[in-house]
Image (cartoon, grey):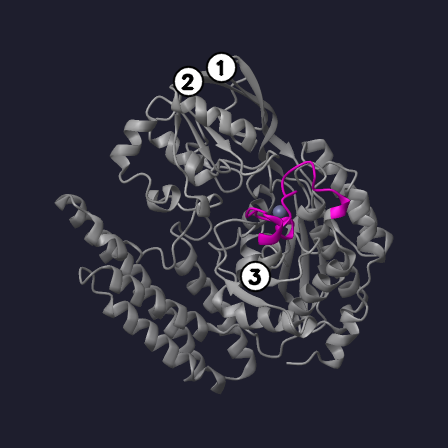
């Protein structure tokens, strides 16, 4: 689909003048302590108002855990460390015997909680790992991520030392709580100290663990509820202003965070300016939001917005587009683009129309980023943006990181102005803008739910096979095929009706594919398998205990019922529109 003349008027307006000024300003403004975060919001707001774009600033109190300092003392030496956000705060220290576990080098950033993924076969059973971990401080290659930290705690570990893969220590988070906690979530706040150390120091600690050494971990964090500003721009659509697209990213960062995420903030700023300038040519509205609490509140800003505006989002939001780490140095590839299936064609085409020869592939988004809208059920795409080509990363000997276009300055003091790239930023801003327009101005909403049905069918077939005949997922597969057949007739419905159905289907089909918790709650921050209530089918052959085996069958029966009811509801919705 070539860029249309009307799209061209928006795209040609995109310039670096305003956004690059914000990148430069943020490059000298740390944005992680609560007062500094609010100062960042003020800078953004003044840039918006300076070009005549109205902005509303919300001031919620959100729950934060801000790392201050940490160290590891062992063998008479004190090593430098960083505490991930939400580590247990032990300023007086916590001591224990060191035990080394072997990580799966390919899953250091995994959000997955199964031991095969985390340990790559070096540990065979939960009983084995519990024996090793109980009462000890675990030292292990990785980033101290929430999935692993929560398991070490469950297995009785006294602490976790994450040995980062390089010479720099990365900031991060170790909690599975998504956003500010409610009463049910708050019990999952980590109860063990977690720290990250550099690789050279970590190697010494691993060696010490092998000789039965001990260590003392010390952490200090600032924790509590803080007022943090949430700037939101609403660009009203001329024809259907109630309906809107949400484009968003975080403006708090680790230190000055240029590639993660000043470039994203600048992108949203320029989108706001261009969309506002051409608002008379917008069919539907666009909301642009900048979140605090991403780094130190595990998405507490976007989660607050999802909760506070839940009814408006449920009724009127057509899609959410996340903007994190665009415009970074050497990031010329789009092979790691995230998208839900129904948006994959849209995302791919928008990239291709701006960068005709780009390498593009879309993948299922992880349970991360500011994807705080899955439980409401919004079509969603993009998370991290362009990234460096695989070959270049290999050539540089870089390990895998979760932002900054693959630059390993990610989540360190090195994420400074040199990580941003003007040309790449200009390109990425156009991709985001075109993607937004293709929803806001679409005559027929571009959500391909039959692609989602294909994904469901592949998932179900995979689970069926993995169950080795112990599950019967034929009803789930049949319901999926029936919905796909109904969708083939949706084109017969009048456009307004068709759009209503295309939007409403998200409220049913997104939650069933991405969440276990009910709508208007938030799932924990670790991997949600595809069609999570059916996923137990694939595990059936692994149960050795007869009682557990039966429990798993009960779980599958209930899970399949949830899925069947959702598919039935979706099919009825489509049929009502075409009959
Ligand atoms: Zn980020």
Confirm whether the magenta stretch covers residue 398: yes
The image quarter containing residue 574 is bottom left
**Residue 262, relative to residue 560: is it above or below?**
above
What quarter of the picture does the N terminus occupy?
A: bottom right
Between marks 3 and 1, how big is the CA–CA gap? 45 Å
Seen as rendered, the residue at the extreme front is 395
Q: Earlier in the sequence, mark 2 or mark 1?
A: 1
Q: Could you tell whether 293 is left or right of 342 in the image?
A: right
Q: Quadrant of residue 102?
A: top left
- What is the secondary structure assignment of the residue under circle 3? strand
Q: Residue at x 47, y 36 (%)?
A: 141
Q: Quadrant of residue 153?
A: top left
Q: Please tell me which residue lies in front, 280 or 261.
A: 261
* Lower sequence index among marks 3 and 2: 2
Q: Are marks 2 and 1 in contact (CB under 8 Å)?
A: yes
- In the picture of the structure, the residue carrying the numbered disc 3 is 337
Q: Mark 2 to mark 1: distance in Å?
A: 7 Å
Q: Main secondary structure of the magenta part?
A: loop
Q: Nearer the viewer, residue 317 or 66?
A: 66
Compared with residue 319, is residue 155 higher up or lower down, i.e. above or below? Answer: above
Placement of 383 over or under 97, stated as above or below: below
Residue holding disc 2: 213
Seen as rendered, the residue at the extreme bottom is 492
- Residue drawn at x 50%, y 73% is 502
Numbered circle sitting on residue 75: 1
Q: Could one spot residue 85 in this view of the protein?
A: no
């Amino acid at each position: 689909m070539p860029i249309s003349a009307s799209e061209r008027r928006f795209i040609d307006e995109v310039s670096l003048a305003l956004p690059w000024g914000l990148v430069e300003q943020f490059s000298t403004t740390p944005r992680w302590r609560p007062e500094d975060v609010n100062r960042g919001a003020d800078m953004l707001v003044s840039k918006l108002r300076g070009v005549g774009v109205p902005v509303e600033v919300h001031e919620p109190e959100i729950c934060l855990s801000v790392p201050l300092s940490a160290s590891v003392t062992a063998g008479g030496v004190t090593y430098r460390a960083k505490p991930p956000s939400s580590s247990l705060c032990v300023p007086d220290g916590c001591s224990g015997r060191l035990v080394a576990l072997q990580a799966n080098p390919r899953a250091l950033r995994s959000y997955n909680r199964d031991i095969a993924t985390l340990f790559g076969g070096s540990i065979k059973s939960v009983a084995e790992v519990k024996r090793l971990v109980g009462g000890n401080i675990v030292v292990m290659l990785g980033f101290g991520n929430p999935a692993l930290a929560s398991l070490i705690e469950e297995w009785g570990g006294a602490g976790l030392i994450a040995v980062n893969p390089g010479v720099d220590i990365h900031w991060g988070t170790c909690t599975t709580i998504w956003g500010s906690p409610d009463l049910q979530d708050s019990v999952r706040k980590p109860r063990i100290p977690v720290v990250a150390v550099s690789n050279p120091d970590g190697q010494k600690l691993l060696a010490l663990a092998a000789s039965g050494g001990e260590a003392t971990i010390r952490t200090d964090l600032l924790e509590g509820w803080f007022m943090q500003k949430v700037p939101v721009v609403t660009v009203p659509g001329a024809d259907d202003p109630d309906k809107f697209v949400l484009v968003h990213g975080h403006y708090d960062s680790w230190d000055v965070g240029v590639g993660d995420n000043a470039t994203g903030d600048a992108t949203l700023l320029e989108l706001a300016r261009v969309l506002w300038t051409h608002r008379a040519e917008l069919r539907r509205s666009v909301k642009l939001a900048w979140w605090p609490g991403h780094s130190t509140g595990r998405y507490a800003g976007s989660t607050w917005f999802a909760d506070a505006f839940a009814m408006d989002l449920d009724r009127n939001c057509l899609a959410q587009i996340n903007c994190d780490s665009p415009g970074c140095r050497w990031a010329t590839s789009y092979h790691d683009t995230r998208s839900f299936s129904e948006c994959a064609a849209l995302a791919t085409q928008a990239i291709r129309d701006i960068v005709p020869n780009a390498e593009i592939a879309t993948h299922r988004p992880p349970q991360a980023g500011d994807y705080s809208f899955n439980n409401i059920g919004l079509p969603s795409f993009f998370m991290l943006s362009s990234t460096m080509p695989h070959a270049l990363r290999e050539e540089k000997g870089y390990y895998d990181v979760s932002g900054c276009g693959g630059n390993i300055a990610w989540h360190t003091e090195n994420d400074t102005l040199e990580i941003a790239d003007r040309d790449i930023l200009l390109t990425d801003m156009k991709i985001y803008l075109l993607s937004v327009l293709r929803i806001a101005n679409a005559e027929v909403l571009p959500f391909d739910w039959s692609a989602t049905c294909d994904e469901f069918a592949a998932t179900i077939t995979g689970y069926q096979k993995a169950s080795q005949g112990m599950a019967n997922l034929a009803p789930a597969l049949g319901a999926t095929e029936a919905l796909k057949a109904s969708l083939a007739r949706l084109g017969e419905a009048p456009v307004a009706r068709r759009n209503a159905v295309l939007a409403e289907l998200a409220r049913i089909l997104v939650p069933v594919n991405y969440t276990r918790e009910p709508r208007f709650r938030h799932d924990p921050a670790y991997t949600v398998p595809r069609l999570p209530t059916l996923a137990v089918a694939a595990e059936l052959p692994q149960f050795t205990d007869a009682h557990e085996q039966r429990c798993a069958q009960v779980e599958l029966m209930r899970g399949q019922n949830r899925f069947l009811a959702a598919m039935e509801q979706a099919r009825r919705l489509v049929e009502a529109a075409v009959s």
